[in-house]
Structure formats: structure tokens, C-alpha cells
Amino acid sequence: MSNLDELPKYVYVIGWIGTFTACCMYIFYIPQILDNLHGHVTNPLQPAAATINCLLWVWYGIKVKDWPVAAANAPGILFGAIAFFTAF
């Protein structure tokens, strides 16, 4: 869809609700990060995949000016990368 202004209002609201829930999903990496830092290391593959996935979606969101997509995935870059690096 090329013009987001043509969407019904509820679709716009759903997009921002999805943004909020996606941010929560990545912020919930904090317990995993804390476990890693306390010596209970976890597998780094899932946070590595999440980091790459989020990086691509943020890039896409910025390029097409789809701000909910970019905003929803931005925390995943930070928290996914931290979870990945603390797993070592």
C-alpha cells in the first residue's frame, strides 16, 4: 500500500498497538540479559536473528516512511544485540 493516509483510522490505531506490543517483546529481553550477566548464559542464536531481523525492518520502515514498523523494531536492535553479546 503506497499511501497510508488512505487507510481507515482503526488500521492506523492497530499499527500503533502492534508497535507497542513489539516494543514490549524486545524489552522483555532484559531478564535474559540479566541471566547472561549473572552467569546463566543462554543461546545467542535467537537474539542474533532478532537483531538482524529488526535491523532490516527498521531500514525498510525508514525507507518507505512506515513509522510504526520502524518504531516497533528499533528496540529489537538494541536489546537483541545486548542479549546476543552478553550470551558469550
Image (cartoon, rainbow, N blue to C red):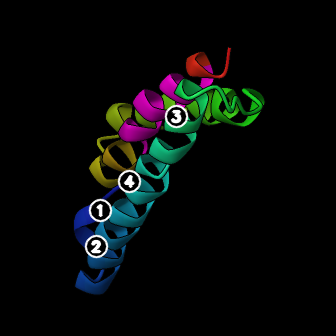
Q: Are marks 1 and 2 in contact (CB under 8 Å)?
A: yes
Q: Secondary structure at mark 3?
A: helix
Q: Residue at x 72, y 33 (%)?
A: 42
- Percent across and percent down for residue 32 are 57, 41
Q: Which mark is residue 23?
A: 4
> In this rendering, which labeled residue sits more in front, label 3 or label 1?
3
- Percent across and percent down for residue 80 are 53, 32
Q: Which amino acid type is marked by label 3?
A: Ile
- Percent across and percent down for residue 79 are 45, 34
Q: Earlier in the sequence, mark 4 or mark 3?
A: 4
Relative to residue 42, is residue 82 drawn left or right? left
Q: Is residue 8 above or below residue 68?
A: below
Q: Which amino acid type is marked by label 2?
A: Tyr
> In this rendering, which labeled residue sits more in front, label 2 or label 4?
4
Q: Are marks 2 and 3 in contact (CB under 8 Å)?
A: no
* Residue pointed to by mark 3: 33
Q: Secondary structure at mark 2?
A: helix
> What secondary structure predominates along the stretch shown in magenta?
helix
Q: Which mark is residue 12?
A: 2
* Residue pointed to by mark 1: 4
Q: Where is the N terminus found, in terms of image quarters?
A: bottom left
Relative to residue 57, is residue 67 drawn left or right? left
